[in-house]
Amino acid sequence: MGDLSLLADQESVAERHPLEGGRVPSVAFRVLGEDGALHEVRSDEVFAGRTVVCFGLPGAFTPTCSAAHVPRFNQLASEFGVRGVHRLVCTAVNDPYVMSAWAKTQRANRILFLPDAEGAFARGLGLLVDLRDAGLGFRSRRYAILVRDGRIDKAFVEPAEPGDPFGVSDADTMLAYIDPQAAALVPVAMFVRPGCPRCARARSLLDEYGLQFEEIELDESVTITAVRAVTGRSTVPQVFVRGRWIGGADDLERYLAANGVTAAQGSSTVAPDESAGGGLGGTRVLVVDDDAEVRDLVTTLLGAAGADVRAAGSAAEARATLASWWPSVLLSDIGMPGEDGYELIRAVRRSADGRGRVLPAAALTAHVEDEDRRRAFAAGYQAHLAKPVDPDALIGLVARLAHH
C-alpha cells in the first residue's frame, strides 16, 4: 500500500513497544447506526472497565484487511472471549458510511467497527501514516493492542517498511500472547444454500461441538457446479474439516461422533458426552430470565449436568445474588423489562472489585439477527445462544466457558 512512513512514531516493532503502559487516546467516533443516523461513541466508553483487543487497519475494502485481518479476529472471537477479552474493536481511517458498508460485507458480527474518520485515534497512538504519495491520504499503521481498563498492556505494531507488512498484528499472535497454551482452531468450511434445512442441521452440529466455521454460500458466482467439481456431489451442505472432505450433515454427525473434535482442543478426542453433558460438577451458574418457564428449564438442564445453579427473574435480582454468591458462568436473557441484559452485563463488567471484568457470560436470547449478536458482544458477553434452548448446546457452552 505504499511507504508506511510515520508522521510521529518511527520505531519498528520491539519486544516492548513504547505504547505499552500508556492510555488509549480519548476521542469521539461517529458511528452510523441501524436507524441511518450518526451517533457519537467515545473511546472512554469503549475501553473503560473492560479488557479489549483493538486492531487498526490502513483502510476498509483493502485486500489484506478484508481477506485476512478482520476474518481471523472474527473467527477467534469466542477464543478471546473465554480468555477474558470482553470486546474486539476494529478501527480504520474511513468515514462512517464506508466503515458501516464494509462491516456488513465482512459479516464480522463479533467485532465493533469504529470509523476513525479524521485519524484522531491513530494520531493519538502515534500510528498515523502519510500515504498521500500513493494517493491514499492519511491512514493508520497496522497494529493490534491489548487494552485493560483504558491502559495498553501489549502492543503489536507492524514495522515502518514499504508495502503493507502483516506479520505481528494478526489475531493468532495476540491470542498466543494472552494464552501461550491456546490450541489452534480446527479449520472448518462448508458449502451451503440459503434456507437449506440440512445446512441448518450441520450448523447446529458444529455449534454443539464448539467448532467455528466459515460458510461458502451458493449464489451466481459460486454455483452447484463448483460443489460438484470439488466433492462429486450435487447437494449441500458439503463440509470440510482440516482440509478433509467430510460430506453432508449425516456424514458430519458420524465424523464428529467418531472423532470428538472440539475447537478448544484442536485434535482432541474428547467426545461430546464427556466435554459437555454430565461434566458440570463444581460449576456455579447464575441464570437470569424473566420468563419463568425458560428459567426453570435451563436451571433443570444445568442441574442435571451437575452444576450448582441459582436463578434470577430480573437484572436487579441478579445483582443482589452476585453481591453474596459469585458464579463461574453468567447466562442472561436480553429482552427483560426494566433493566435489560445489555445493562446487566455492563454493570457486571464495571464491578468495583474487578471480578466482573473476567466473569464468563453468555447471552441467552430469542434475538438472533446479526445485529443482535453484535450488540451482545459489544455489551460484554462472550457468547450468544439462541432460544429455544438446545440442551446439548447449552451444556457444552457452559462447560467451555467454565473451563476457561
Image (cartoon, rainbow, N blue to C red):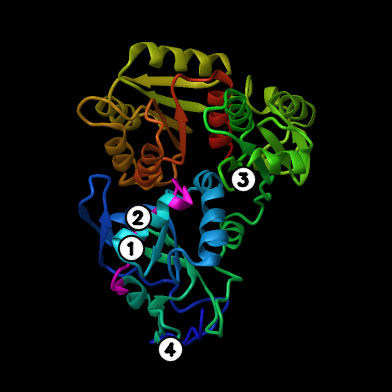
CB of mark 2 within 8 Å of CB of mark 1? yes
Percent of width and height locating residue 91:
39, 64
| Disc 1 residue type (three-letter) | Pro
Quadrant showing the C terminus: top right
Which residue lies at the image location 57% right of the left edge and 76% below the top edge?
Answer: 165
The residue at which mark 3 appears reads as 222
Q: Residues within 10 Å of mark 4 (few under 14, many from 20)?
A: few
Residue 151 versus residue 179 in the image, above or below: below
SS state under label 3: loop
Question: What residue does disc 1 label?
Answer: 115
Real-space Cα distance between discs 2 and 1? 8 Å
Q: Which residue is mark 2?
A: 100
Residue that mark 4 sits on: 133
Q: Is residue 193 above or below residue 226?
A: above
* Distance of label 4 from label 3 (alpha carbons): 38 Å
Which span of residues is magenta-colored?
A: 105-120
Q: Residues within 10 Å of mark 3 (few under 14, many from 20)?
A: few
Discs 3/2, front = 3
Q: Are marks 3 and 2 in contact (CB under 8 Å)?
A: no
Mark toward the start of the polypeptide (3 vs 2):
2
